[in-house]
Image (tube, rainbow, N blue to C red):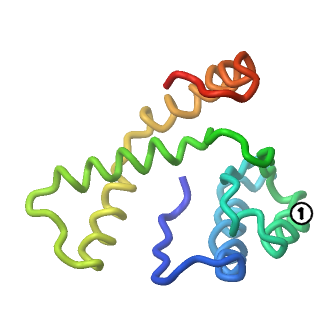
């Protein structure tokens, strides 16, 4: 897991591009110096912007990047992680009151996610992909 990055404004393709070299590339080069790291994102407009796509292509020798077909179902485990973080924030007492409190709580909870939980999510991917293939890209049961 890489660092949790707080973005304080609307994220655009250009702003996303400013995050990739500073945070993604440095993280991948340290943690996956063998160049076997894999980066996954969804098809959000800013993720598939020309500038981001070009940057990812230029750095394809540094780490692998999953390419999702257009209009593909959401298969990114970050959705499950987001739900776990939201649940942890809702269970906080007292709840965060300010944006800075929320940021602090999210970073704390991000660091507290159990490695086994994360490994289970990763290990679930082959089953999820197989189910998706069986229904030819249609809806699957979660």
Query: Between residues 92 and 26, which one lies in front from this camera angle?
Result: 92
User: Looking at the image, which residue sits at the far left?
Assistant: 94
In the displayed structure image, the side of residue 130 where residue 9 appears, left or right: left
Residue occupying the point 58% across, 77% down: 11
What number of labels is visible? 1
Say which residue label 1 marks: 57
Query: Between residues 140 and 37, which one lies in front from this camera angle?
Result: 140
Label 1, residues with CA under 10 Å away: few <14, some 14-19, many ≥20: few
Residue occupying the point 36% across, 64% down: 107
Query: Between residues 95 and 72, which one lies in front from this camera angle?
Result: 72
In the displayed structure image, the side of residue 55 where residue 96 appears, left or right: left
In the displayed structure image, the side of residue 125 where residue 134 appears, left or right: right
Where does the image place residue 4, in percent across and percent down from the top left?
Answer: 48, 65
Residue occupying the point 55% across, 59% down: 2
Where does the image place residue 75, in percent across and percent down from the top left?
Answer: 62, 38
Where does the image place residue 126, in percent across and percent down from the top left?
Answer: 67, 24
The image quarter containing residue 98 is bottom left
Residue occupying the point 35% across, 51% down: 85
The image quarter containing residue 45 is bottom right
Work out whether 121 lies above or below 61: above
Work out whether 86 lies above or below 24: above
Where does the image place residue 62, in percent across and percent down from the top left?
Answer: 83, 59
SS category of the residue bearing label 1: helix
User: Looking at the image, which residue sits at the far top?
Assistant: 134
């Amino acid at each position: 897991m890489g660092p949790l990055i707080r973005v304080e404004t609307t994220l655009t393709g250009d702003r996303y591009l400013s995050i990739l070299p500073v945070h993604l590339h440095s993280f991948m080069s340290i943690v996956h110096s063998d160049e076997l790291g894999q980066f996954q994102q969804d098809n959000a407009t800013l993720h598939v912007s020309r500038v981001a796509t070009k940057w990812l292509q230029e750095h394809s020798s540094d780490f692998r990047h999953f390419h999702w077909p257009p209009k593909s179902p959401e298969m990114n485990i970050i959705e499950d992680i987001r739900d776990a973080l939201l649940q942890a924030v809702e269970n906080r007492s007292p709840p965060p009151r300010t944006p800075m409190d929320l940021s602090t709580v999210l970073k704390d909870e991000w660091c507290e996610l159990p490695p086994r939980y994360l490994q289970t999510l990763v290990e679930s991917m082959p089953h999820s992909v197989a189910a998706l293939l069986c229904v030819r890209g249609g809806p699957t049961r979660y």
